[in-house]
Image (tube, rainbow, N blue to C red):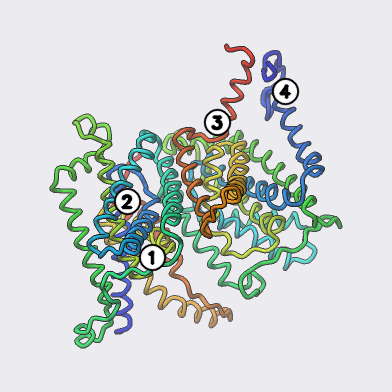
Amino acid sequence: MLYRESGQFKTSYAADQQLFPILQDRVAVLALLAFALVGVPLVATDYWFTAILMPFLVFSLATLGLNILTGYAGQLSLGTAAFMAVGAVAAYNFQLRVPGIPILVSFVLGGLSAAAVGVLFGLPSLRIKGFYLAVATLAAQFFIPWLLVKVSWFSNYSSSGVITAQPMVIAGFAFDTPVRKYLLVLVIVAVMALAAKNMVRSRVGRAWMAVRDMDVAASVIGIRIMQTKLIAFAVSSFYCGVAGALYAFAYLGSVEPDGFNLDLSFRILFMVIIGGVGSILGSFLGAAFITLLPILLEVILTDVTAMTGISLPPGFISMAQLVVFGALIIFFLIVEPHGLARLWQIGKEKLRLWPFPH
Amino acid sequence: MNFFFEVLIGGLLAGVMYSLVALGFVLIYKASGVFNFAQGAMVFLAALTFVGLQEKFGLPLWGAFPLTLGVMVLLGIGIERVVLRPLVNQPQITLFMATIGLAFFLEGVAQIVWGTDVRRLDLGLQDEPIESIMTNFNLLVSKFDLAAAFVAGVLVAVLAVFFNKTRIGRALRAVADDHQAALAVGIPLKQIWAIVWSVAGFVALVAGLLWGARNGVQFALTFVALKALPVLILGGFESVLGAIVGGLIVGASEKLAEVYLPALMSEFLLKHYDISINLAGIEGWFAYMLALVFLLVRPEGLFGERHIDRV
């Protein structure tokens, strides 16, 4: 009843090809953005910003990056965290060594550095596929953090390799409180998500999907495999690099290269799987789910222990998280291999008919 | 020169231990086309269960072994029933991701049941040099490493016979070749998968015992499985022999690189670029880089099957 495209006639090509062809979608997206920009800062507390919203946004961006590579171009990568590390360290170094460079420019340069490294480690994808490629990207995952720790130039000769991000100032305005940081990150993520949404339906995006579905067939119809795959690696790593920079600058403040470990890569991969492989919306849903799950689990477990008076062994909560994580992944793959985004689509289909049965 | 040989032999023997873990991957990949990321978690679970049973009930080695084996077999059957059966005919990548979830699940369960402490595992083998070799060739060769290599060798031989000579082994190979054709000639697919996962559980148990006895039973055992991945790549996913050869290559080159490369590279950098860096810790990534470079030359590994893609 409410969500129905009937009566919305497209009279021009522009109208036919717009990003959200249905009026309700446009309204919903705009309302959501407006709420995130205005409503959230009014109601949320500092805890919400630093513990929930910030990691959610940063991981959404990284998930978006991995989703472009794995979901759209079909190249499995386990090196996401390494590319994030490159982005973070590069942005830090540009801030440190280039006097007067705007912070946004160093984010972009950080992303570009990550893209360059991504292309380098994407080269094997031209020869190998699937699991072989996944293992090859592990090389990046282990090599890059090692290099960043060993070559202390990257961390400006700090003893443990920890980098402490510079304050974020744009045109004299300091983004120093949680609310301001949140707004900055929100704008960056929104812009990049919009770009991604557009990219995946462009010529490049369609080429990615063709390569994903069957690369031999794609090459037969004239898609350049090498170019397509490397662009996917570059764009994906760019997103991950910017996410890494934001992770360091806006979320944590100071990071060590060892923090960008395989666990982080897996977490982002899970966000992609649970959210929906090959879906922009899914990246956000997955990131929200995986960010909220540990917090929820912890709250529930502490409540249960407080109520029943059972004292849990130390580390039980993190172990329980592992178990629930693992079980959920398997559950999702069995029940809904296309992730939360697919559930949303089913919901939309239902909504079109509601309240009538047919 | 003696030192070189010592490092080489140490590396080769360590490589055999890698092969042992890689073997578990190969078995499952051969029979069901699943790249089982949970193999490391299975190694960890097996070792932890073994030590846990020993501690809790004071069981001797020969008592804890069959019990743990029973647990692993039950686990194999359970995995087939709960995880694999609902995922039949899904793309390989879905199954791979399911095994990542499985790895998390097993790691969590193992540590909830048995605790997170580092345990010592005593198999009655000492990590000490063999005297006869010491006196005759002046080489340090660890007794423990040699025994481990021997166990691995026996295991490979047994598996080779199992795959080639027994009825179940032939069925396994048939399933690996073509699921549907195997079903058509009356091979029970579900049973076969349960068997293969149980056998992989057995291999995981052996690997877990040896690694656990060497490094202590701890969470770090799961990382050993990550080391097995470059071994697989070098050897090729489908080949038992490849797992062994790959393990030897990775083990030897890794140890040699760790001993010689950092010094050489540091010296070179200092001499030509006046940069002084301590490059120790190459071991952490060398195997992966080696595998990556190797893949560029030979994408299907040393003994892997060359795939021809058709539209």
The chain containing the residue under callout 3 comes to A
Q: Amino acid at mark 3?
A: Arg
Question: Answer yes or no: do the residues labelled 3 and 1 have beta carbons within 8 Å?
Answer: no
Does residue A266 appear to the left or right of B61 in the view shown? right
Closer to viewer: mark 1 or mark 4 = 1
The chain containing the residue under callout 2 comes to B
Question: What is the spatial separation of the Cα atoms under label 3 and label 1, in whole angstroms?
Answer: 42 Å
Query: Element type at marker 1?
Result: loop
Circle 1 packing at 10 Å, graded few (<14), some (14-19), many (20+), is: many
- Residue on which the image places disc 3: A342
Query: Do marks 1 and 2 share a chain?
Result: yes
Query: Element type at marker 3?
Result: helix
- Residue on which the image places disc 4: A23
Q: Amino acid at mark 4?
A: Leu
Q: Amino acid at mark 1?
A: Val
Question: Answer yes or no: do the residues labelled 4 and 3 have beta carbons within 8 Å?
Answer: no
